[in-house]
Amino acid sequence: MNMLPVVVGVLSVNCYIYYCEETKLCAIIDPGANPERIMDLIKKNSLQPMYILLTHGHFDHIGAVKELKELTGAQVAIHREDEGMLTDAVLNLSAHFGRETVQVPPDFVLEDGDILQIGKTSLKVIHTPGHTRGGVSYLGDGILFTGDTLFRGSIGRTDLPRADFSELIQSVNEKLMVLDNSLPIYPGHGSPSTLKLESITNPFLIGVESE
Ligand SMILES: [Zn+2]
Ligand SMILES: [Zn+2]
């Protein structure tokens, strides 16, 4: 598997390093905190970061963006609809949780269907709004990073500002569940799963499939 996980921060965000085995180029997905631990892993594996990619703009997923950009020179990208969250402590909810943080504006913004080439591998951007308006999942080589859209046995919170429960369910059913159901999913928090397992066991998805 060309991916290295590292759990970061007080809210235990899964940061993932997705890399090309041949070229050692990589993308850092959701560096929420602990930049030194993320850098250790990158150095230990002789990886070269090209991108810092966010699944969405909540503070627990973006907290080490600025520092890692300075350390690696990697380009920061987030979906257009979550762009403002990188530099606004109210929008990224850090002010609300009493740990105010602002990062740097993105180098470029993402749209549904964009493909990011990382050496000989790639990540495809799948816009999955609902938890936030600009929430995305990233589809790599036999792996799906779902951020706070889809968890093992659960889905992302929709009681927060700019979130929408029915939009989130629609995103999961129409954008994720249509993919190869043997795909492993790596969520923003908690353990990995597969699309198939979630389609059978996830209480938020059973019985709400669109007819
Ligand atoms: Zn979130
Ligand atoms: Zn989160």
Image: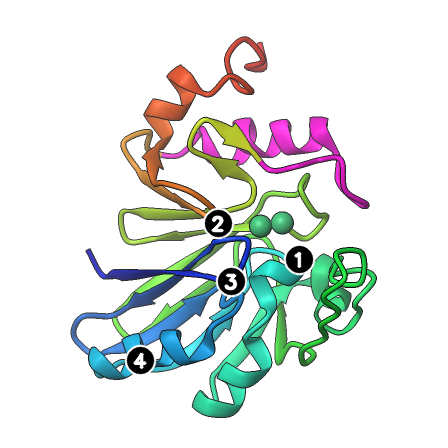
Q: Closer to the camera: disc 4 or disc 3?
A: 3
Of marks 4 and 3, which one's residue comes earlier in the chain? Answer: 3
- Secondary structure category for the residue under label 3: loop
Q: Three-letter amino acid code at disc 2?
A: Gly
Q: Position of residue 133 (x, y in %)?
A: 72, 48
Q: Is residue 207 left or right of residue 40?
A: right
What is the C-alpha distance between the residues marked 3 and 1? 13 Å
As drawn, 159 above or below 39: above
Report the residue marked by disc 1: 58
Report the residue marked by disc 4: 40
Q: Judge by depth and name the residue closer to the eye, 33 or 110.
A: 33
The answer to the question of whether label 2 and label 1 lie on touching residues, with beta carbons closer than 8 A, is no
The answer to the question of whether label 4 and label 2 lie on touching residues, with beta carbons closer than 8 A, is no
| Span highlighted in magenta in the image | 156-179
Q: Is residue 28 left or right of residue 171?
A: left
The answer to the question of whether label 1 and label 4 lie on touching residues, with beta carbons closer than 8 A, is no
Report the residue marked by disc 3: 9
Residue depicted at x 38% and y 15%: 200
Of marks 1 and 4, which one's residue comes earlier in the chain? Answer: 4
Report the residue marked by disc 2: 188
Q: Number of numbered discs present?
A: 4
Q: Quadrant of residue 199?
A: top left
